[in-house]
Image (tube, rainbow, N blue to C red):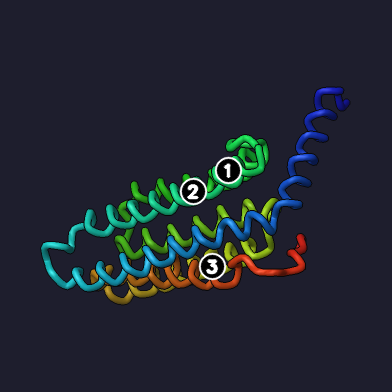
Amino acid sequence: MRTRHDTEEAEENLRVIRSLMEKATVYRALSAPGALLGGLLSIVTAAVGTFLSGQPKYAADAFFLFPWLIVLGITAIANGFLLWRDAKKRGDTFISPGMKLVLTAMFPGMAAGGLCLLIDCRGGLSVTASLWVLCYGVSLLAAAPFAPASIRWLGRLFFSAGAVLLVLNYCFVEVDEGFYPAFVPHLIMGCTFGLFHLVYAACAWPRRTRGETFGA
């Protein structure tokens, strides 16, 4: 039997979701600069990593992990700043109920990507990079009900790419007994987190539109 508290909680959740839907176009416009920054940083990091990977002293895992974690940190800070500035402009709280709802939805996928660092898997860093792509797609899809349709399509793209990359990794591990050129993980990151985000930024950059629909 539903209590009054349950009813009030359900009504509050509906109000939050409705508010997020109404702000979908605004959030898409805010995410475009962050995607552009993340995409450019990813392309540069992938290019430098690919160039240096041919030198033995840069073949250690740390020379792959640390630069990409720095890219993640910078992009996350930039996105947080854009959201904070918009919330301040509108007179809203930064950590709003809507943001909590979205972060709660995205957290399992992002946490799974972080835990992939603990896996010592066949295929090494190429598999780790592929899992990052897959988990990022899962987290975007989890937030899709509260986000613009463009986020949903970006999530589908990352999820599909991650799934295909994992299958390819498995096939090459079976054939080549786990041997991968050192530049492959950087190439995976540059082609996904780099190019995908640049394409998204170009498509979502603020312009006059009639808005987006949900449920696509």
Front residue of this view, candidates 193 and 93: 93
Determine crowd level at label 1: few under 14, some 14-19, many 20+ residues with C-alpha closer than 10 A: some
> Which callout, 2 or 1, points at the residue further toward the start of the chain?
1
The answer to whether residue 179 is seen in the rendering is: no
Secondary structure state at the residue bearing disc 1 = helix
Residue at x 36%, y 56% (from the top left corner): 71
Q: How many C-alpha atoms fall within 10 Å of the one at disc 2: few (<14), some, or many (≥20)?
A: some
Q: Amino acid at mark 3?
A: Ala
Say which residue label 1 marks: 103
Q: Is residue 38 visible?
A: yes
| Cα separation between marks 2 and 1 | 10 Å
Q: Tell me the SS state at disc 3.
A: helix
Q: Nearer the viewer, mark 3 or mark 2?
A: 3
According to the image, label 2 marks what residue? 110
Callout 2: SS: helix
Q: Measured from the top left, where is residue 157 in percent x and y?
A: 56, 69
Q: Give, as a three-letter code, the residue at label 1.
A: Leu
Task: Tell me residue 164's x, y (percent).
Answer: 49, 71
Quadrant that contains the C terminus: bottom right
